Image (tube, grey):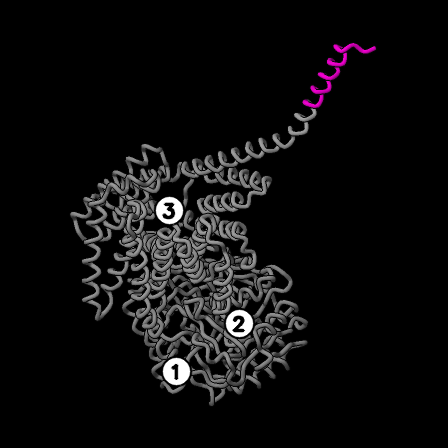
């Protein structure tokens, strides 16, 4: 018999067991909950740590930290956390200068995978349909705080990438979303919109100074005030928002001031703008006083943004011609320096000392500040900062006559600029236009210094000039390094050709002849003695009635240029053979073959080629079995003629049919796309799917120093230089399918633009072409058909390309009908 105690014992044990079972059964749920809470807290902690690291200039560490927090949020399937942590990663990518990665990260965060191409800087400006698609995609976003933050960041990153139209669209749609929920993000979006409009304004202003085409300049001059006013409206709207924070208002005021100063300077060079110029000047004074009177707003910013804001204000004040404001600028720069010392930020210490150097009026003090600024930049290998102070020191030493020190600093500045430019060119849209104002002068100052030395280092001058010309082209294309080789390393050349470098240094034109034996010979002339003839000849060449211009008008100018530039070095040139010209910006649209010695054109004695320097693409000989061409052209009006960017006053090109027929007869297995067959898609299909050593295009076109105005006219649309790049992007420059010869027939350079031949070089480089033949002015189509027929005959006879072209040109000169220089 079981005793009651025994039963109670078992009963107690059973209850205990049940209790244990119940505890065990609830434990996993509680454990999971606790694990989630632990992971969530860990992710929050990592997010906070990432922001602290970024504030300390530790962008790499911040990126890794936020990547860890993203992993945790993915593990928790916390969509808002994932979005927020990806937006944070974008901040780190931006701090590292990796703006394309930042852009793609934001698209992932916002689940905008349908518009991945928006981050691609090689694509052309969006068409209306693409803009509407972008608006529709953004409009579908939920107006949550996190999404609005992500969209605002996307707009800012696109601005930095140079995708200004896309940035504007994104930010305007974001503002619409924010207004639906009266979001606190509205003020920040207004600031971003003000910034994007200012970027568009600045790009237009830079284009105005860069591009010389009168009609285009007139169009831009009308748009610039509109964009300035639009940007100002956004800043002023933000500044007037009730209860806006002092720091937000300060950021808007500083950007507002930057725009006003830039606009005031531009207006000062415009005719009939005196009243507006005075009004803007008054606005600057009022705004400066407002910022200075409310200087406590700088204290509301965290240390680094506060330093940046003070230096921004100081640099703006330095551009206003007022000694009292100069002392105010120095005060703000010194406060920034003090803060940089407090937080021990090496980058900001460099910027602070550099700003004080700019503000100083005493040479010794200026020099001391720049040396300190450079030392800090070099200590952290910040070459993007260092080159700025090396430029300044080079200029100071040059003025002091300390040639060796000036050379050292210019050398270092150019080396650092090259490194910075190579890493940023494909991702930073602003760099294209800042190059001319900020970097190019250093190249020219350096060459000027070398050439005025007792024993000029001509070899180094050539190297610097080549670097400048290649940089200008890469900058024009916004591409990476071009694949170039030295002339003396070319295969299939029996001897190095004679190279003539013509360099425009403003007050002087420098000519350096590099003979076949490597010897160098230098000649210098005051530019005023030849500038008029250059302008006169260029004007004649680009005149729509060039064929009617008297021969003597051409030969007078071309002979004067020959006598001033070529005659002094003629004794160092061979009696025949090939001359390779490296031409600076003001000479690039003038055909050297046209220079006249009083009896003969230069083309009658020499084969003429032009290149960026003694470094060119590795050419290959066209063998008989490689005479395979893709031929495309228009002979009549097409829908693309009505495009607003198309060349003006185009006529039908009926002789193009004959030209295409002639080229077909002289080549093998060629494909011809005439009129309706010459569409963008068909051209792309043929170009990318087949191997064509020769690409021959006979159509209207225009070459300009503006990439978007460098176009070829296809049947259905214009092909601009970015389209051209996308057409052949799948082909590598070193592949078997590289284009050996690109012929651009019936095109012309933009009127009134000395640098428009940059478009020819751009088209050639974009296509990966090793040699290019192009027309510089609107030529007679009949003569072009004949010229091309003779050119291809020469190629079939085994002549080098330059000699084949020369023989074709001589055949025209020997024909009484085409003897004029026009042909």
Residue identifier under label 1:
544
Name which residue lies at 33% across and 66% down: 208
Contact between marks 1 and 3 (CB within 8 A): the answer is no
Name which residue lies at 59% across and 70% down: 684
Q: Which corner quadrant holds the N terminus?
A: top right
Horizontal and vertical percent position of residue 500: 43, 64
Q: Residues within 10 Å of mark 2 (few under 14, many from 20)?
A: many
Mark 1 or mark 3: name the one nearer the start of the chain: 3
Is the stretch drawn in magenta largely helix, strand or loop? helix
Horizontal and vertical percent position of residue 326: 20, 47
Q: Residues within 10 Å of mark 1 (few under 14, many from 20)?
A: some
Judge by depth and name the residue closer to the eye, 593 or 666: 666
| Cα separation between marks 2 and 3 | 40 Å
Residue 11 belongs to the span the image colors magenta: yes
Judge by depth and name the residue closer to the eye, 59 or 179: 179
Contact between marks 2 and 3 (CB within 8 A): the answer is no
Residue identifier under label 3:
387
For this view, does 670 lie left or right of residue 428?
A: right
Name which residue lies at 61% across and 84% down: 661
Q: Tell me: residue 502, above or below residue 750.
A: above
Q: Tell me: residue 675, above or below residue 432.
A: below
For this view, does 467 lie left or right of residue 666?
A: left
Residue identifier under label 2:
802
The span picked out in magenta is 1-19
Mark 2 or mark 1: name the one nearer the start of the chain: 1
């Amino acid at each position: 018999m079981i005793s009651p105690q025994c039963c109670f014992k078992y009963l107690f044990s059973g209850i205990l067991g049940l209790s244990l079972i119940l505890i065990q059964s609830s434990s996993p749920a509680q454990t999971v909950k606790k694990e989630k809470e632990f992971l969530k807290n860990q992710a929050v902690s990592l997010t906070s740590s990432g922001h602290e690291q970024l504030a300390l200039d530790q962008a790499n560490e911040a990126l890794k930290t936020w990547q860890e927090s993203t992993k945790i949020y993915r593990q928790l399937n916390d969509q808002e956390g994932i979005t927020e942590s990806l937006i944070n990663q974008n901040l780190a990518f931006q701090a590292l200068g990796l703006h394309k990665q930042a852009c793609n990260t934001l698209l992932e965060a916002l689940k905008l995978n349908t518009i991945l191409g928006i981050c691609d800087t090689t694509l052309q400006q969006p068409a209306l349909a693409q803009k509407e698609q972008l608006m529709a995609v953004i409009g579908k976003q939920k107006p949550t705080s996190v999404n609005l933050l992500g969209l605002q960041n996307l707009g800012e990153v696109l601005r930095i990438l140079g995708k200004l139209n896309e940035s504007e669209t994104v930010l305007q749609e974001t503002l619409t979303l924010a207004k639906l929920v009266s979001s606190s993000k509205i003020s920040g979006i207004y600031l971003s919109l003000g910034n994007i409009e200012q970027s568009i304004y600045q790009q237009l202003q830079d284009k105005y100074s860069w591009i010389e085409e009168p009609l285009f300049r007139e169009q831009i001059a009308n748009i610039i005030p509109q964009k300035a006013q639009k940007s100002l409206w956004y800043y002023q709207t933000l500044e007037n928002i009730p209860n806006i924070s002092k720091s937000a208002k300060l950021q808007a005021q500083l950007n507002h001031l930057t725009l006003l100063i830039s606009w005031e300077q531009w207006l000062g060079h415009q005719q009939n703008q005196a009243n507006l110029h005075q009004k803007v000047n008054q606005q600057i004074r009022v705004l400066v006083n407002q910022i200075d009177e409310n200087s406590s707003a700088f204290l509301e910013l965290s240390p680094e943004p506060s330093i940046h804001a003070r230096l921004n204000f100081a640099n703006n004040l330095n551009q206003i011609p007022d000694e009292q404001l100069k002392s105010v600028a120095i005060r703000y720069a010194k406060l920034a320096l003090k803060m940089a010392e407090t937080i021990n930020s090496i980058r900001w210490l460099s910027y602070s000392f550099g700003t004080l150097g700019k503000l100083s009026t005493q040479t010794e003090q200026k020099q001391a500040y720049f040396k300190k600024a450079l030392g800090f930049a070099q200590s952290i290998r910040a070459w993007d900062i260092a080159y700025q102070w090396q430029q300044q020191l080079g200029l100071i030493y040059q003025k002091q006559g300390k040639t060796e020190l000036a050379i050292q600093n210019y050398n270092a500045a150019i080396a650092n600029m090259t490194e910075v430019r190579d890493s940023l060119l494909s991702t930073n849209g602003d760099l294209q236009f800042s190059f001319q104002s900020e970097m190019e002068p250093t190249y020219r100052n350096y060459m000027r210094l070398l050439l005025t030395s007792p024993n000029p280092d001509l070899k180094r001058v050539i190297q610097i000039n080549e670097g400048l010309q290649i940089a200008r082209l890469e900058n024009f294309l916004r591409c990476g390094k071009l694949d170039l080789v030295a002339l003396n390393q070319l295969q299939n050349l029996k001897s190095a050709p004679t190279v003539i470098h013509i360099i425009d240094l403003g007050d002087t034109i420098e000519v350096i002849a590099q003979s076949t034996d490597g010897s160098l010979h230098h000649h210098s002339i005051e530019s005023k003695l030849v500038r008029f003839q250059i302008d006169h000849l260029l004007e004649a060449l680009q005149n729509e009635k060039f064929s009617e211009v008297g021969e003597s008008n051409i030969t007078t100018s071309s002979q004067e240029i020959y006598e001033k530039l070529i005659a002094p070095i003629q004794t160092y040139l061979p009696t025949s053979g090939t001359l390779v010209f490296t031409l600076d910006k003001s000479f690039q649209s003038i055909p050297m073959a046209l220079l006249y010695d009083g009896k003969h054109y230069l083309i009658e004695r020499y084969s003429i080629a032009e290149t960026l320097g003694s470094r060119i693409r590795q050419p290959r000989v066209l063998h008989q079995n490689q005479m395979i061409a893709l031929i495309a052209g228009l002979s009549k009006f097409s829908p693309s003629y009505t495009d607003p960017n198309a060349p003006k006053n185009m006529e039908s090109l009926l002789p193009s049919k004959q030209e295409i027929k002639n080229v077909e007869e002289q080549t093998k297995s060629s494909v011809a796309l005439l009129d309706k067959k010459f569409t963008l898609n068909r051209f792309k299909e043929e170009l990318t799917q087949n191997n064509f050593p020769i690409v021959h295009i006979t159509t209207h076109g225009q070459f300009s120093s503006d990439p978007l105005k460098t176009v070829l006219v296809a049947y259905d649309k214009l092909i601009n230089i970015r389209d051209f790049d996308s057409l052949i992007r799948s082909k590598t420059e070193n592949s078997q399918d590289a284009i050996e010869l690109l012929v651009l027939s019936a095109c012309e350079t933009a009127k009134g633009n000395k640098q428009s031949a940059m478009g020819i070089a751009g088209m050639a480089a974009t296509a990966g072409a090793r040699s290019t033949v192009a027309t510089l002015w609107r030529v007679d189509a009949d003569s072009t058909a004949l010229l091309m027929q003779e050119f291809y005959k020469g190629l079939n006879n085994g002549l080098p390309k330059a000699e084949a072209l020369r023989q074709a040109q001589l055949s025209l000169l020997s024909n009484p009908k085409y003897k004029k220089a026009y042909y």
